[in-house]
Image (cartoon, rainbow, N blue to C red):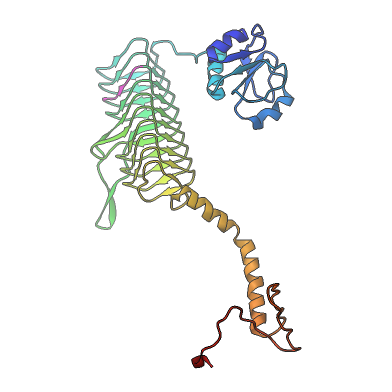
């Protein structure tokens, strides 16, 4: 592809020779003359010394070597993704239709151009929309509905009556609709509480590999449009995740948690049951959320606290070893003063202090009012 054509794909302004051929993308530190790389931040500029890219995607204002071919665009990261797609093409799609060795239950309805891979089991009353891809070794339970253009990768399990929207991506090993973790303690033992709800995943939701989303106890576990969930995330029963939320890997949401729209959870965040996190709130990695979080808050720590308070407290804790040394020194000085030895008078430029007689301790009290008769 000519660089001038790639500039149009990336919606970028071209600086340099638009006639050179670009055939692939490359790393900043290892690109060749027929490759394009991107610079997201000026701190990566030294890496260019190790490579000779044919072109560089960069934001306005980033100073690049003289003579470099540059595609200038505000969001260099997004532009690079467009370049990847243009130069490496779309992923290969399986051939439409039902492969051999698929078990299909009664009343199966499959839309145009959809495909089901081998060794997949399809239950009763399952409905697939148009352009759906079910890769091999999946289980699709009774009454499941999957919307148009959704991709279900290998070894995914979708249990009965779950609803998957349009343009969703479910990565390998995800389990959707398993029983929630609920028990009654009866006569000295735990008895499983029936889980008869379902899961509803709305349009444009991505589910990471080996993530689990439990069915509700009697209502619905819901993930609304545009939300993105990373690998190895636990979503418990009755959880409600709003639109365009982002949840990083190994986070865990307990039962009946509510995330309002645009919430962001870092990796390994834990959220206690029946907690609500307000719209636009951000929770740092490894934070334990044990109380409701107000909209727009930035939280960190265990238990969770307002982000700036946590950072100040953490900075103070890291100074403790030095502070303990200072404390011991001050304590030793106080003890020597109390014992009446090794006293050094305070130097005060504003007043002359009499010299202490040898072997005595003198104490000066400044700015003290003259004693009253009662004090004598």
**Vertical comparison of 249 with 163: above or below:** below
Compared to residue 229, the image places residue 88 above or below, namely: above
- The magenta segment: 143-148
> Closer to the camera, 214 or 319?
319
Query: Image quadrant of residue 10?
Result: top right
Q: Position of residue 134 (x, y in %)?
A: 39, 20
The quarter of the picture where the C terminus appears is bottom right
Quarter of the rendering containing residue 235: top left
Q: Which residue is more in the foreground, 190 or 132? A: 132
Is residue 146 inside the magenta stretch?
yes
Is 29 displayed left or right of 244 in the figure?
Answer: right
Quadrant where the N terminus is found in the figure: top right
Looking at the image, residue 4 sits to the left or right of residue 310; the answer is right
Location of residue 80 in the rendering, given as x and y in whole percent from the top left corner:
56, 20
Relative to residue 328, is residue 264 drawn left or right? left
Name the residue rendered at 39%, 25% in the picture: 138
Measured as percent of width and height from the top left, residue 334 is found at 64, 78
Q: Main secondary structure of the magenta part?
A: loop
Q: Is residue 83 magenta?
A: no
Give residue 216's quadrant in the image.
Answer: top left
The reply, left or right, for residue 135 in relation to residue 17 is: left
Residue 30 location (% of width, % of height): 69, 23
Count of marks, rendered view? 0
In front here: 289 or 7? Answer: 7
Q: Residue at x 41, y 44 (%)?
A: 297
């Amino acid at each position: 592809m000519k660089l001038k054509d790639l500039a149009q794909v990336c919606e970028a302004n071209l600086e340099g020779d638009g006639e050179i051929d670009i055939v692939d993308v490359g790393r900043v530190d290892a690109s060749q003359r027929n490759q394009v790389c991107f610079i997201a931040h000026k701190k990566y500029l030294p890496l260019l010394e190790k490579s000779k890219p044919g072109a560089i995607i960069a934001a306005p204002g980033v100073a690049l070597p003289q003579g470099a071919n540059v595609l200038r665009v505000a969001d260099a990261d997004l532009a690079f993704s467009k370049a990847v797609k243009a130069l490496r093409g779309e992923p290969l799609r399986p051939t439409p239709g039902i492969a051999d060795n698929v078990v299909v239950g009664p009343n199966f309805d499959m839309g145009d151009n959809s495909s089901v891979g081998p060794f997949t089991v399809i239950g009763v009353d399952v409905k697939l929309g148009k352009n759906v891809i079910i890769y091999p070794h999946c289980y699709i339970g009774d009454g499941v509905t999957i919307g148009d253009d959704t991709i279900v990768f290998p070894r995914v399990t979708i249990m009965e009556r779950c609803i998957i929207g349009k343009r969703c991506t479910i990565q390998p090993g995800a389990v959707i609709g398993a029983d929630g973790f609920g028990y009654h303690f009866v006569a000295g033992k735990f008895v499983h509480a029936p889980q008869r709800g379902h899961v509803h995943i709305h349009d444009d939701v991505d589910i990471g590999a080996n993530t689990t989303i439990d069915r509700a106890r009697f209502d619905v576990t819901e993930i609304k449009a545009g939300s993105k969930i990373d690998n190895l995330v636990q979503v418990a029963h009755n959880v409600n995740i709003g639109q365009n939320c982002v949840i990083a890997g190994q986070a865990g949401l307990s039962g009946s948690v509510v995330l309002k729209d645009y919430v962001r959870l870092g990796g390994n965040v834990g959220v206690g049951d029946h907690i609500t996190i307000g719209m636009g709130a951000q929770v740092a990695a490894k934070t334990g959320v044990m109380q409701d979080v107000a909209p727009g808050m930035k939280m960190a720590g265990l238990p969770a606290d307002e982000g700036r308070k946590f950072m100040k407290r953490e900075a103070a804790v890291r100074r403790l070893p030095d502070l303990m040394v200072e404390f011991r020194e001050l304590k030793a000085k106080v003890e020597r003063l109390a014992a009446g030895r090794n006293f050094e008078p305070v130097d005060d430029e504003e007043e002359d202090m009499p010299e202490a007689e040898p072997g005595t301790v003198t104490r000066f009290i400044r700015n003290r009012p003259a004693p009253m008769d009662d004090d004598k």
